[in-house]
Amino acid sequence: MLVYRIAPVDPTATPTRTGHPLFVDPAWQGGGRWDNPSQYDLLYLSEHADGAVAEIFQGFDTWTPVMFHHPAAGFDRQLVTYDLPAKARVIDLDDARFLDDHHIRPSRVASKNTVITQDIALRLHTDLGTTTVGLKWWSSLDADWTSYALWNRRLLTLEKIEPLTITHPAVVAAARRLGRRL
């Protein structure tokens, strides 16, 4: 299955440096809904290219080419496509039976309170982290978009890196879905 991420990409970066498509900068961890940086680092992805775009640029009312540059990293953001093999076990937080078995209320998964969601993630990572690669859930922007948080990236294969433009189909689709101006 293909999954997507918007990331600042430096074609010369090694896997341990900012700009590599699989690198997770520890300085950027901690504020995400499933983050627990003292226990693991997370790579956030989407099952949909337009969902990945929407997650990153949702805060902009008008989308312009300037937003594709990542000032802190110093590189342009690009659409990175990975293959996540079917054998990768991902915890499905949209599975009612799983939630019931693990005493997790759906409203807690949907919570915007990161103390709650980070606690859920830590508990699942502690209980199932050695047999799973991460979590998936519905995007709070659009329930038709599936989001992923992977604490184990070893099974991911880099498929493609595409420059983002204001006319890229994923950008246009995300803007339309979120009601943003281009």
Image (cartoon, rainbow, N blue to C red):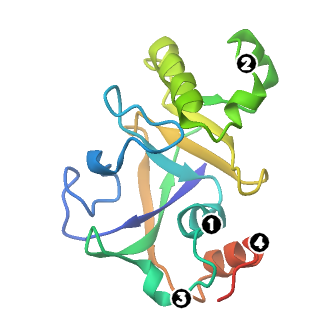
- Judged by depth in the image, the label closer to the viewer, 4 or 2, is 4
The residue beneath circle 3 is 64
Looking at the image, do the residues carrying marks 3 and 1 touch, with CB atoms under 8 Å apart?
A: no
Dot 2 amino acid type: Phe
Dot 4 amino acid type: Arg
Q: CA distance from mark 3 to mark 1?
A: 14 Å
The residue beneath circle 2 is 98
Per the image, label 4 sits on a secondary structure element best described as helix
Q: Earlier in the sequence, mark 3 or mark 1?
A: 1
Dot 1 amino acid type: Ala
Q: CA distance from mark 2 to mark 1?
A: 28 Å
Looking at the image, do the residues carrying marks 1 and 4 touch, with CB atoms under 8 Å apart?
A: yes
Q: Earlier in the sequence, mark 4 or mark 3?
A: 3
Q: Measuring 71% from the left and 57% from the top, which residue is drawn there?
A: 141
Q: Earlier in the sequence, mark 3 or mark 2?
A: 3
Badge 2: few (under 14), some or many (20 or more) residues near its Cα, within 10 Å?
A: few
Badge 1: few (under 14), some or many (20 or more) residues near its Cα, within 10 Å?
A: many
